[in-house]
């Protein structure tokens, strides 16, 4: 089965041939009864645009698309968007597009795939809330150096929620239940208040039991979910020229902590359980997340058609975790490192402001200019008590990003258009804090206050120009051919006053073709890319302080192609997406942390002076633990990703339909470490099947659903020496009413 799917995905000519056959099939067997597909809308370029007519590589998913593919969170998007991978690292998720993105949970390192909710930048923590009352989700592939700037070397994800509308009461209510004690309740109501004001209220509650059984005496419930979300939107439109849109979102999410086991081949692997659904903890685990987001968008259209836009945002996100770091039940031992646990608190506040001046379209010239300001404050408090030397990490980080940008389009002819965009981003980062061991131990050298073994304070700043030059050729009303060059940039940073790392940059060359066939009932998006990726940032061990820290480890060349299709032929619906990515890193030298003795990379201390023997945690001799690699793939970069869905709508009565749907998603194998060990560093490929049976009667909808129907057991990510797992087979019933 896998060979057949990969063979089909490899064949670009098969897609073109299929595009030639489908129109004839549609005309002969499905005459005028088959309506055209709904327009694919993207708003990432600050205008509402038809994705088939702009030179961007994008997957745009409506709320119906998200429901059809069982996409309920950001990590589910990898089953619906080619080239995207999201791997689990516990506190954060490694989001990568075409092998570029986030490969570190360190607060000093920036996102490479920026995520936005209603235009507001999202920090990497507390991004896993459930989707509800969504308008659409846009996944843009490749650097977005003009409109996003310093956090988009890999791409960007835009999540757009539904906004209030005037003059109409509407909304929906939905309830579901399934195995593992799962239950959800969500809904929304749009309420006009007079002719100029409207309010939209929406909420979501979701829960399920743990997928795991803790064999320890504490009987933790890792992965258990209890989530509550709410949103209020207010639209005020006193005139046709001006409107103000305010939204506030709250999220409260509690689980019993993260579920993981030691990675095979690592220190504690001999003690790991046999079944992935059995975990063994001898310390308490929990995970509490809270988030608040406020946004205010102001728009004013001048008499000459120019639009002035302001978008202001504030976020306050907090996460509190208790970890059993070794993920094992260990017998009493004389070593001071027999048990390792962690109490972690992270809080991030983000203030953002963007100003745009947007020209009207339709003439020879169009343009957008803008300015952007962002300030982040991050507080980290990590307490790692052990049976010997407790370790505390206290960090306070301040970040500031300022950007100015402009894009202009010029129609050389009615069919040929040139777009040029440019941005300059300035980044500053300052931090105070350090690593302290032995706090609370009253005898020398700790003396109750502990011994500082690393100073994590310092400062850093940089800036880079980015942008895009694109040429669009609208061959006819149904065919767009384009080519562009784009540059992206991710800021550098520092680990301490004496340790910094440089920015990442990527230069992206792309060509693409977007045909629309069968009178709008079939669409394709086909593209190829080549990336020159410089100064890849990755966490490696700094022997000067014994800490895992971001460094510029290598350069890379990344190339590949992508293809997507959407079709609606009478009662038959079909969608398809595939991506091939080949990456190759240059030479890299680093410490092999897998080979280090207990207690691991963060407790051994700095490099011992010459002639001084190892004495953890005061110092350690790392000689003999260095390794080098050349030519391997980027971490978190599957070579192949593939997704497809098929459905058929049966008309039972005039207002009643029955629609079975089947979806399949494939994510190829990917490495998590530059050691490229097939035992310790490989996330193996996975194929997931989901299905739905939908009965729709007027405004009522009833569904039976199932995900991971084959019951695949698969690893979703790694953090330190532990690995995480995907959910098991889930199924249930859902009912909704829309008005």
Image (tube, grey):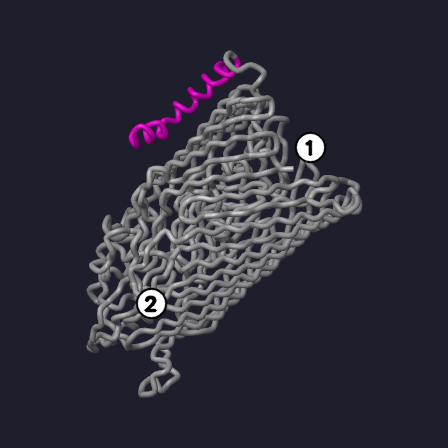
Res 612 visible? yes
Crowd around label 2: few <14 · some 14–19 · many ≥20 (10 Å): many
Inspect the magenta stretch and tell me whether residue 90 lies in it: no
User: What's the residue at 78%, 42% (across, down)?
Assistant: 240
Provide the secondary structure element on which disc 2 rests: loop
The quarter of the image holding the C terminus is top right
- Observer able to see residue 561: no
Would you say the magenta stretch is mainly helix, strand or loop? helix
Where 130 sits versus 54, above or below?
Answer: below
Q: 512 or 690: nearer the eye?
A: 690
On residue 283, the disc is 2
Q: Where is residue 615 in the image (x, y as percent from the top left)?
A: 23, 76
Q: Where is residue 119 in the image (x, y as percent from the top left)?
A: 59, 49
410 vs 401: above or below:
above
Disc 1 is placed on an element classified as: loop
Is mark 1 in CB contact (under 8 Å) with mark 2?
no
Q: Residue beneath label 1, please?
A: 362
Residue beneath the point at 65% across and 52% down: 232
Q: How far apart are marks 1 and 2 (CA)?
A: 64 Å
Closer to the camera, 284 or 614? 284
Please indicate whether residue 697 sits to the left or right of residue 613 in the image.
right
> Picture quarter containing residue 358?
top right
Side of 332 relative to 244 (left or right):
left
Tell me where the magenta segment starts and ends, as one range.
1-27
Compared to 164, does 264 lie above or below? below
Question: How many numbered badges does the structure rendering display?
Answer: 2
* Residue 157 image point, x, y percent: 51, 46
Q: Nearer the viewer, residue 668 or 162?
A: 162
């Amino acid at each position: 089965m896998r060979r057949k799917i990969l063979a089909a995905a490899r064949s670009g000519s098969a897609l073109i041939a299929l595009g030639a056959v489908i129109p004839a099939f549609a005309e002969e067997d499905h005459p005028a009864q088959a309506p055209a597909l709904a327009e694919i809308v993207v708003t990432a370029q600050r205008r509402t645009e038809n994705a088939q007519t702009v030179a961007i590589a994008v997957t745009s998913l409506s709320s119906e698309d998200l429901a059809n593919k069982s996409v309920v969170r950001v990590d589910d998007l990898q089953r619906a968007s080619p080239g995207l991978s999201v791997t689990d690292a516990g506190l954060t998720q490694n989001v990568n597009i075409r092998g570029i993105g986030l490969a570190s949970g360190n607060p000093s390192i920036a996102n490479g795939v920026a995520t936005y909710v209603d235009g507001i930048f999202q920090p990497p923590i507390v991004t896993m809330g459930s989707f509800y009352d969504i308008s659409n989700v846009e996944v843009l592939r490749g650097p977005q150096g003009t409109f996003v700037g310093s956090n988009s070397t890999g791409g960007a994800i835009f999540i757009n929620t539904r906004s209030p509308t005037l003059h109409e009461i509407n909304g929906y209510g939905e309830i579901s239940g399934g195995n593992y004690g799962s239950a959800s309740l969500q809904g929304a109501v749009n309420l006009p208040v007079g002719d100029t004001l409207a309010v939209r209220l929406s909420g979501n509650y979701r829960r399920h039991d743990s997928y795991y059984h803790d064999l320890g005496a504490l009987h933790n419930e890792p992965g258990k979910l209890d989530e509550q979300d709410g949103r209020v939107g207010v639209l005020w439109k006193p005139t046709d020229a001006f409107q103000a849109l305010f939204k506030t979102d709250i999220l409260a999410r509690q689980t019993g902590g993260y579920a993981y086991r030691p990675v095979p081949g690592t220190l504690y692997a001999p003690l790991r359980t046999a079944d992935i659904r059995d975990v063994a903890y001898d310390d308490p685990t929990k995970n509490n997340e809270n988030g608040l987001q406020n946004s205010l968008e102001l728009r004013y259209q001048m008499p000459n058609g120019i639009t002035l836009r302001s978008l202001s945002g504030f976020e306050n996100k907090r996460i509190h975790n208790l970890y059993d770091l070794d993920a094992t039940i260990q017998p009493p031992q004389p070593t001071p490192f027999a048990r390792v646990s962690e109490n972690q608190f992270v809080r991030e506040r983000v203030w953002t402001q963007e100003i745009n001046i947007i020209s009207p379209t339709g003439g020879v010239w169009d343009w957008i200019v803008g300015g952007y300001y962002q300030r982040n404050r991050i507080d980290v408090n990590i307490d790692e008590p052990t049976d010997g030397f407790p370790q505390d990490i206290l960090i306070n980080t301040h970040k500031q990003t300022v950007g100015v940008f402009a894009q202009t389009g010029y129609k050389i002819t009615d069919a040929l258009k040139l777009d040029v965009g440019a941005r300059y981003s300035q980044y500053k980062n300052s931090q105070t804090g350090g690593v302290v061991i032995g706090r609370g131990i009253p005898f020398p050298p700790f003396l109750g206050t502990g011994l500082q073994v690393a100073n994590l304070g310092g400062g850093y700043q940089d800036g880079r120009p980015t942008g895009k030059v694109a040429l669009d050729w609208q061959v006819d009303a149904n065919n767009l051919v384009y080519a562009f060059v784009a540059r992206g940039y991710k800021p550098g940073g520092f680990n301490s006053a004496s340790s910094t790392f440089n920015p990442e940059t990527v230069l992206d060359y792309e060509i693409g073709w977007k045909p629309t066939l069968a009178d709008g009932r079939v669409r394709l998006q086909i593209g190829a890319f080549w990336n020159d990726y410089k100064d890849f940032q990755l966490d490696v061990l700094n022997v000067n302080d014994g800490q895992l820290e971001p460094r510029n480890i290598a350069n890379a060349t990344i190339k590949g192609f992508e293809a997507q299709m959407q079709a609606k032929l009478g009662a038959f619906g079909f969608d398809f997406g595939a991506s091939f990515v080949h990456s190759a890193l240059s030479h890299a030298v680093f410490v092999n942390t897998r080979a280090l003795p207990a207690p691991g990379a963060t407790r051994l201390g700095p490099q011992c002076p010459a002639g001084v023997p190892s004495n953890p945690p005061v110092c350690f001799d790392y000689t003999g633990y260095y390794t080098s690699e050349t030519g391997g793939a980027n971490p978190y970069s599957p070579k192949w990703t593939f997704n497809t869905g098929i459905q058929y709508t049966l008309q039972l009565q005039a207002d009643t339909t029955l629609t079975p749907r089947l979806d399949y998603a494939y994510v190829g194998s990917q490495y998590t470490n530059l050691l490229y060990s097939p035992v310790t560093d490989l996330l193996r490929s996975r194929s997931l099947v989901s299905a739905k049976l939908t009965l729709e009667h007027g405004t009522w909808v009833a569904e039976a659903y199932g995900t991971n129907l084959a019951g695949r057991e698969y690893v979703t990510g790694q953090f330190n020496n532990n690995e995480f797992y995907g959910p098991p087979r889930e199924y249930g019933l859902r009912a909704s009413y829309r008005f």
